[in-house]
């Protein structure tokens, strides 16, 4: 299935070529969908990783815990991937998009023409420019290799400092604790996951992690990393606190890989801007997944979603759109996280302007917080409440008026609402 991208091969390309850049989750779904929708032309999938298309959520969970092998992340079984009959170019970064002649260039000097191009380049873990970081064992977590490098470091007797109390940082903290490591989370904001969840949910996360023995330091900024006389790393905070440790994990967000698009003159703003058809400012170029900034009616603005569901659905939508099929991609944002025995799911965009109605008590084993505009549910956050959330999703999508008293009454089945 692998084939060298040669200039000769490019010249021989037919007029019906679709190239996908990025062989992650969105790219993998785009490729499958093109074939499923009947595209029989030349299909080229280029990724700078050596792995076939795969999913990332288990990297911070089962893979880091040593409970699953990297092969389990594959989007498709080898036979199904083979059956797509695509030209797969692993471990080859694309270096340039030449829109004038409609071709892309790769780091190994090849040029491949396209009729339609789909950008699924995802993002890169953001690095922190901390003095002393170069000489310390600092990890980030985005790729399979990152998880494989970090996993052996976590374990009984090890001390881990996690910089960043967002989703990735908290999932790493939970997995490290489960494996017996001592963990301190250092968060610059006054609460955990400040960007994505309201205060009560942050408090719930804080209580969860502290109850498992994790030290959580809020409003805490890292000044530098030094070395103790016994050779351990020491994370020094601006307030003078010193945290000796065996490894440091930085989880401070993602930088979208939009440089190819920017260099090619496509409209970008913190990612590649697309319309509801997943089309960029060039009608022959589409984008999907973590790199795409999409108009989102649920948020009332453009959004770049970093979620498993979006990578799949937008990858499929972009493929259909590239084939000229009618597409209107306007997803209700959905994200989940697993930490310890907690499954937290967020539908929609909770806002401070919303009225909060809770079903079950926040802080207990299972609860849902609904975010209402008047009597209409606009968002919901559920803790170990997957079934209720499926109904909550329908309420949000249907924009239905609800009786808040019945909504908060756990005796009233959600199906009756
Ligand atoms: C550790 C971790 C845990 C997560 N957990 C959850 C979770 O619990 N729930 C949830 O909803 N979401 C979760 N996510 C988010 C979810 O995995 C992502 O939203 C999803 O992987 C995005 O898919 P994508 O295809 O857009 O990007 P990616 O999967 O990152 O794929 C992009 C690919 O493009 C490649 N690429 C980039 N530039 C080039 C280039 N120039 N040439 C060639 N190839 C290139 C990249 O190397 C990469 O292989 C998690 C993510 C991580 C990292």
Image (tube, rainbow, N blue to C red):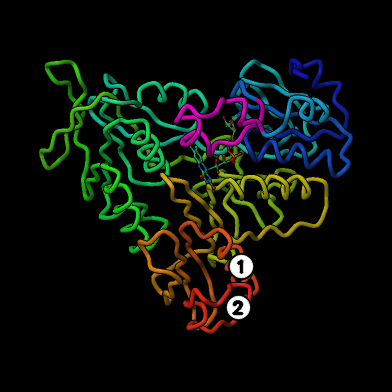
Q: Quadrant of residue 68?
A: top right
Q: Which residue is mark 1?
A: 391
Question: Vertically, is 80 above or below 193?
Answer: above
Residue at 88% in and 29% down:
14
Residue farthest to the front?
411
Q: CA distance from mark 1 to mark 2?
A: 8 Å
Residue at 61% in and 79% down:
400
Is 26 magenta? The answer is: no
Is 60 magenta? The answer is: yes
From the viewer's perspective, tell me whether residue 242 is left or right of residue 374.
left
Q: Observer-nearest residue: 217 or 100?
A: 217
Q: Quadrant of residue 253?
A: top left
Q: Observer-nearest residue: 310 or 261?
A: 310
Question: Vertically, is 1 above or below 283?
Answer: above
Residue 376, given in percent of the width and then of the height, sits at 54, 79
Quadrant in the picture for the N terminus: top right
Residue 194, given in percent of the width and then of the height, sits at 35, 55
Does dot 2 land on a helix, a strand or a loop? loop
Which label number is shown at residue 417? 2
Identify the main secondary structure in magenta. Answer: loop
| Residue extent of the magenta highlight | 52-74
């Amino acid at each position: 299935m692998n084939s060298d991208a040669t200039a000769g091969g490019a010249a021989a390309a037919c007029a019906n070529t679709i190239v996908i850049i990025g062989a992650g989750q969105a790219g993998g779904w785009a490729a499958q969908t093109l074939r499923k929708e009947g595209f029989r032309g030349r299909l080229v999938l280029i990724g700078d990783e050596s792995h076939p298309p795969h999913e990332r959520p288990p990297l911070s969970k089962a893979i880091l815990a040593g409970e699953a092998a990297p092969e389990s992340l594959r989007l498709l079984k080898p036979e199904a991937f083979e059956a797509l009959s695509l030209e797969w170019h692993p471990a080859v970064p694309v270096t340039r998009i030449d829109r004038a002649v409609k071709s892309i260039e790769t780091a190994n000097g090849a040029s491949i023409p396209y009729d339609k191009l789909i950008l699924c380049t995802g993002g890169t873990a953001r690095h922190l420019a901390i003095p002393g970081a170069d000489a310390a064992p600092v990890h980030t977590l985005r790729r399979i290799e990152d998880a494989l490098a970090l996993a052996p470091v976590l374990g009984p007797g090890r001390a881990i400092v996690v910089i960043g109390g967002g989703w990735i940082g908290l999932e790493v903290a939970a997995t490290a604790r489960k494996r017996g490591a001592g963990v301190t989370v250092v968060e610059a904001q006054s609460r955990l996951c400040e960007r994505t969840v309201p205060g009560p949910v942050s408090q719930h996360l804080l209580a969860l992690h502290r109850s498992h023995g994790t030290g959580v330091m809020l409003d805490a900024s890292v000044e530098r990393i030094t070395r103790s006389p016994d050779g351990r790393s020491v994370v020094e905070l601006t307030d003078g606190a010193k945290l000796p440790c065996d490894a440091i994990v930085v989880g401070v967000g993602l930088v979208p890989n939009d440089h190819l698009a920017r260099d090619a003159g496509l409209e970008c703003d913190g990612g590649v801007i697309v319309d509801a058809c997943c089309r960029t400012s060039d009608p022959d170029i589409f984008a999907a997944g973590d790199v795409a900034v999409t108009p989102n009616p649920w948020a009332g603005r453009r959004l770049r979603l970093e979620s498993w569901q979006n990578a799949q659905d937008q990858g499929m939508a972009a493929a259909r759109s590239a084939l000229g099929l009618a597409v209107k991609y306007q997803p209700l944002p959905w994200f989940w996280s697993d930490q310890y025995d907690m499954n937290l799911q967020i539908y929609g965009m909770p806002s401070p302007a919303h009225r909060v109605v809770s079903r079950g008590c926040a802080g207990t084993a299972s609860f849902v917080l609904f975010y209402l505009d008047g009597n209409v549910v606009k968002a919901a956050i559920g803790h170990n409440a997957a079934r209720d959330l499926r109904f909550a999703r329908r309420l949000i999508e249907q924009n239905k008026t609800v009786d808040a008293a019945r909504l908060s009454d756990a005796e009233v089945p959600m199906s009756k609402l």
